[in-house]
């Protein structure tokens, strides 16, 4: 009988992950001490000399050099804290200096750069934080190693009558009691070692993040929000222009003709009643066609089936109206009250699929296509692919630019892969 393996080969176990994290955190904390010492000396000496000689011509170059050196140390620390915090490395946007810039402009650029002064402040303030984290980390490592291995070297220590912790705690001075006590203390240090070292590493990393990347992260968030706002405005403008064009080209023209037909019928009533009847029949037909077009336009604004029954039914209706066979896979729980995404996200996904299927029918020459909509954690994953001629691109229009704006407005991403002759795949991820 074959036994079932508890863990796949190559899959890290919990103990292995803790051990690796403990090792990386310890290296991060301990290597921070020489870096902090060097950074402190360079920052303090450079700032002191620069400010002290500011009245002379060499004061500014020295100060600029100190800021450049602080930036170098800051770049090193940004690379170091990224794996500790499990976040991507954030690099602030420093002011660039063109190749045509003169010497004094190159000197003044870092002096006028706010982030450079934050880098310098970090160089001077990181040492006290490091002098807290490093001794605590070393103490816990020594306590864990010395205590848990005490039984190996107890016989080498000159312990006399009444010496040691065991007699003070009323355990006597027997070797067994002494070894048991020190081993218990060592096990306490050993068990709490990953937690304490992790705390020391996070103390250093959070402090560095606050001074070295905090402003950049805030700027990136503001930029992202502004891009989302502009994308929402752009998507709304595109939708309104399309609606205006559709109304102008469809119902408006039919209503103009309807008014003309009714006017002609009124004139014909006294002259040729039979012709008036035929004109009224045409007007009635125009009315029905106008109503059908208005219903189609209303579905484009807020499809009733999407509002009432959710994405699975709405996308199934889209696939059913298509002229190309669609392999459909939509999570059923997305149509339930508990599983439905936000209304704006739901609408954007619907129009993404509708636009993609329209493009496939009009431009791709495909024979089959597939639509997949699924939830992955707090993200909604949408994939539409076909076996057509490819060559689609967001920049080329076909409605994809408006869909991309809709997706970005919700903080999502849209990727279009469409090599010539290799089919098209549209992959979108949106927050639920």
Image: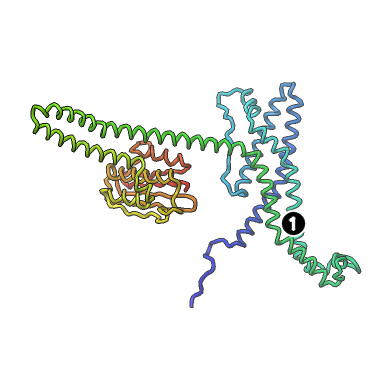
The image quadrant of residue 68 is: top right
- Where is residue 9? Give x, y as percent: 52, 64
Residue at (66, 52) in percent of width and height:
25
Q: Is residue 321 above or below residue 119?
A: below
Residue at (23, 33) in percent of width and height:
254
Q: In this view, does 41 lie to the left or right of 173?
A: left
Residue at (73, 28) in percent of width and height:
50
- Where is residue 237? Give x, y as percent: 39, 33
Mark 1 residue element: helix
- Front residue of 382/63: it is 382
Q: Is residue 381 above or below residue 151?
A: above
Residue at the extreme front of the image, as rendered: 270
Residue at the extreme bottom of the image, as rendered: 1
Q: In this view, does 280 lie above or below 20?
A: above
- Front residue of 277/44: it is 277
- Where is residue 244? Give x, y as percent: 32, 32
The colour mode here is: rainbow
Residue at the extreme right of the image, as rendered: 161
- Front residue of 105/165: it is 165
The local crowd at label 1, few if under 14, some if 14 to 19, many if 20 or more residues have their Cα within 10 Å, is many
Q: How many marks?
A: 1
Q: Mark 1 points at which residue?
A: 140
- Where is residue 336? Give x, y as percent: 42, 54
């Amino acid at each position: 009988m074959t036994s079932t393996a508890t863990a796949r080969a190559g899959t890290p176990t919990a103990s292995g992950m803790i051990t690796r994290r403990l090792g990386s955190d310890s290296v991060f904390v301990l290597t921070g001490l020489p870096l902090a010492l060097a950074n402190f000396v360079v920052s303090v000496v450079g700032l002191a000399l620069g400010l002290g000689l500011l009245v002379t011509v060499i004061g500014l170059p020295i100060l600029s050099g100190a800021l450049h050196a602080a930036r170098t140390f800051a770049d090193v620390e940004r690379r170091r804290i990224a794996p500790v915090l499990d976040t991507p490395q954030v690099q602030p946007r420093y002011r660039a200096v063109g190749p045509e810039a003169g010497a004094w402009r190159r000197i003044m650029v870092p002096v006028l750069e706010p982030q450079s002064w934050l880098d310098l402040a970090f160089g001077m303030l990181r040492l006290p934080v490091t002098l807290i984290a490093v001794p605590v980390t070393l103490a816990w490592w020594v306590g864990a190693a010395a205590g848990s291995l005490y039984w190996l070297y107890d016989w080498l220590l000159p312990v006399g009558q009444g010496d040691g912790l065991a007699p003070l705690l009323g355990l006597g001075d027997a070797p067994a009691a002494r070894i048991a006590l020190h081993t218990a203390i060592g096990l306490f240090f050993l068990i709490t070692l990953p937690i304490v070292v992790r705390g020391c590493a996070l103390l250093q990393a959070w402090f560095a993040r606050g001074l070295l990347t905090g402003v950049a992260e805030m700027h990136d968030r503001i930029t992202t929000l502004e891009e989302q706002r502009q994308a929402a405005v752009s998507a709304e403008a595109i939708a309104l222009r399309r609606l205006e064009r559709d109304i102008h080209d469809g119902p408006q023209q039919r209503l103009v003709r309807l008014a003309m037909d009714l006017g002609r019928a009124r004139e014909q009533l006294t002259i040729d009643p039979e012709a008036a009847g035929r004109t009224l029949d045409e007007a009635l037909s125009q009315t029905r066609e106008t109503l059908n077009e208005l219903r189609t336009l209303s579905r484009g604004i807020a499809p009733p089936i999407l509002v009432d029954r959710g994405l699975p039914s709405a996308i199934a209706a889209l696939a059913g109206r298509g002229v190309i066979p669609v392999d459909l896979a939509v999570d059923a729980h997305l149509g339930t009250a508990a599983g439905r995404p936000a209304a704006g996200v739901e609408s954007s996904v619907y129009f993404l699929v509708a636009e993609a299927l329209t493009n496939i029918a009009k431009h791709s020459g495909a024979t089959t296509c597939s639509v997949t909509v699924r939830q992955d954690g707090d993200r909604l994953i949408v994939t539409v692919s076909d076996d057509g001629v490819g060559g689609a691109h967001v920049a080329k229009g076909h409605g994809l630019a408006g869909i991309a704006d809709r997706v970005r407005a919700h903080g999502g991403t849209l990727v279009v892969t469409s090599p010539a002759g290799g089919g098209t795949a549209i992959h979108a991820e949106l927050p639920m």
